[in-house]
Image: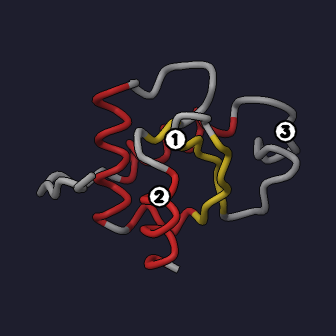
């Protein structure tokens, strides 16, 4: 599966809205983060089995990760109860995130 590049980059306000939606699910600390998610990270669900991954917020600055966000927005939208779901095979997601680290 190829990741399509696009010139559209998410603006900070959109990224903030995405993170707010992701952190509003489940049990949260006083800052709104899920209890098991370190500061500066957020949760995404990936693959057929919706495996949970905790990723650094800095990934939001990478065009490759933003491409995944665009695909997630197109396929699922950002307004659903499960959290931010990335429509990508887990092996592809792990490969991408290992390159971004």
* Contact check, label 2 and label 1, Cβ < 8 Å: yes
> Residue 21 location in percent, x, y?
58, 32
Whichever of labels 2 and 3 marks the residue nearer the N terminus, that label is 3
Question: For the residue labelled by badge 2, is the local secondary structure a helix, a strand or a loop?
Answer: helix
> Residue 5 location in percent, x, y?
16, 58
* Contact check, label 3 and label 1, Cβ < 8 Å: no
Q: Toward the viewer: 68 or 40?
A: 68
Q: Nearer the viewer, mark 2 or mark 3?
A: 2
> Residue 19 location in percent, x, y?
56, 44
Disc 3/disc 1 C-alpha distance (Å)? 24 Å
Indicate the quadrant where residue 75 lies: top left
Question: For the residue labelled by badge 1, is the local secondary structure a helix, a strand or a loop?
Answer: loop
Q: Toward the viewer: 44 or 61?
A: 44
Q: On the image, numbered disc 1 is attached to which residue? A: 47
Whichever of labels 2 and 1 marks the residue nearer the N terminus, that label is 1
Side of 23 where 27 appears, left or right: right
For label 3, the crowd category at 10 Å Cα-Cα, with few meaning under 14, some 14 to 19 and many 20 or more, is: some
Q: On the image, numbered disc 2 is attached to which residue? A: 93
Side of 39 where 46 appears, left or right: left
* Residue 47, placed above or below residue 67: above
Q: On the image, numbered disc 3 is attached to which residue? A: 28
Point 38% across, 53% down: residue: 12
For label 2, the crowd category at 10 Å Cα-Cα, with few meaning under 14, some 14 to 19 and many 20 or more, is: some
């Amino acid at each position: 599966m190829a990741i399509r590049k696009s010139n559209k980059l998410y603006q900070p306000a959109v990224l903030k809205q995405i993170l707010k939606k992701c952190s509003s699910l489940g049990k949260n600390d006083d800052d709104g983060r899920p209890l098991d998610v370190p500061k500066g990270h957020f949760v995404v669900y990936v693959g057929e089995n919706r495996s949970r991954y905790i990723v650094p917020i800095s990934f939001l600055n990478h065009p490759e990760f933003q491409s995944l966000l665009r695909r997630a927005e197109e396929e699922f939208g950002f307004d659903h109860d499960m959290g931010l779901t990335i429509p990508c095979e887990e092996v592809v997601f792990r490969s991408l995130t290992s390159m971004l680290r």
